[in-house]
Image (cartoon, grey):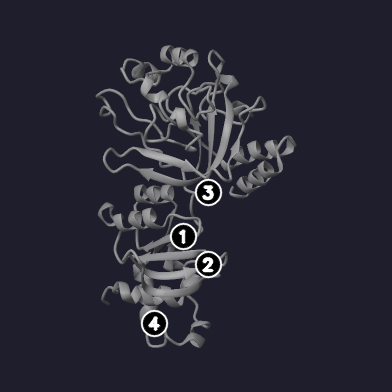
Amino acid sequence: MQTLTEKQIEDVFERFHEQLLESGLTLLDRQHIFDNRLRADLLFRDKNGTTVLVELKRKEVTRDSIGQLIEYHGMFASPKIRIILAAPFIPEAIRKSFEHFGIEYVQFSMTQIEKFYHSIKNRVKDEVIKKNITLPKTIITRPLSEKIIDGNIAFKVTYNDKNWSDVCSPNVAKFNFAKRVWCRLQSKDDDNCQSKQWKKKELDKPRAPCYDSVALKSFSFYPGHFHGPKRGDNEPKRCLGAKMGKIAIFTSREPNANEDERFIMAIGQINNIRTLADDGFEQIYCDKETGLFFLGNNKPKFWKYYANPNTDRIVWSFGLFRYLYDTTVRNIIEDIIKSERLLPKEKVNAEYLLNQL
């Protein structure tokens, strides 16, 4: 028995897409070419009206073969477009990368799909017969529904008294220069955040002295990088546990406050993860329109909800981020809704974010 071509695999997925992928899919096109010349093997609309782009592979997915999917993500990343890869085998490291970028995946048995194809190839085009055909349960080895549901993240953001939308005041900058590692490093530069160049015009990113100074203005952050030669000086840290569509929580604490006083100043849904091609640094963006911002005195306390997995101590220690379970984020947002201190628009946003879990 010869190995199937991608076209033959495509025949099976085209006609049995509801059994192999998910119910409620409507076929829109096959070998669809977009305006930017990228091609989709199969194009569907799901039951929610979202466009679903499906890419099929007949061999194991390797690092060299994922560029197309990442390119699709970069071109089409949108709440109205889903990207699905179907392949015989996808290594765990690549699956984590796909989950990180919001690319869904299905694994199928080449042996089983080959047997099935040859058993129905002479009648596969008959739509009446199709309804009476039962697919082997072993044809799909990792279904679409079997994916990681937790992908939330909490960021540690250096305190800023300009609502994380401008450089710190001189007094706060002085404290941060003395107490915060990155601030201390950049304080030695002539163009540190207190130099005149940063006061000339409104800040944005990438034109800002640090990510913290525009964290809420751009509603984004980055996972950090390593210092020193042991891990490669300036090597970016990876945050593959954060997932597109999940929730990010921005936290900070005031100067001289204890760690247990760490507060939450914003909550948002992750809607874009960008990697800079030249240095590999990631920046994780949230949707500002549906975000929650707590800039007054009633900020939720982070450690009321989060506990370190390996110790009872309240300590953040190293790193700029922590992964959060859905249950943790759900408890935070439910308490915020119960507080009855939200404006109507804020309540709508809180309920929206809750529904994303």
| Mark 2 lies on residue | 46
Q: Amino acid at mark 1?
A: Arg
Q: Nearer the viewer, mark 4 or mark 1?
A: 1
Amino acid carrying label 3: it is: Ile
**Residue underneath mark 4:** 119
Q: Earlier in the sequence, mark 2 or mark 3?
A: 2
Residue at (29, 55) in percent of width and height: 67
Q: CA distance from mark 2 to mark 4?
A: 28 Å
- Binning the other alpha carbons within 10 Å of mark 1 as few (below 14), some (14 to 19) or many (20 upward) gives many
The residue indicated by pointer 1 is 82
The reply to whether dot 2 and dot 1 touch (C-beta < 8 Å) is: yes
Looking at the image, tell me whether mark 4 or mark 1 is earlier in sequence order: 1
Q: Residue at x 42, y 47 (%)?
A: 100
Q: Is residue 352 left or right of residue 76?
A: right
The alpha-carbon separation of the residues under discs 2 and 1 comes to: 9 Å
Specify few, some or many for label 4: CA neighbours under 10 Å numbering under 14, 14-19, or 20 or more. Answer: few
Q: Which mark is residue 149?
A: 3
Badge 3 marks a residue whose secondary structure is: loop
Q: Amino acid at mark 4?
A: Ser
Q: Earlier in the sequence, mark 3 or mark 1?
A: 1
**Residue 176, visible in the rendered structure:** yes
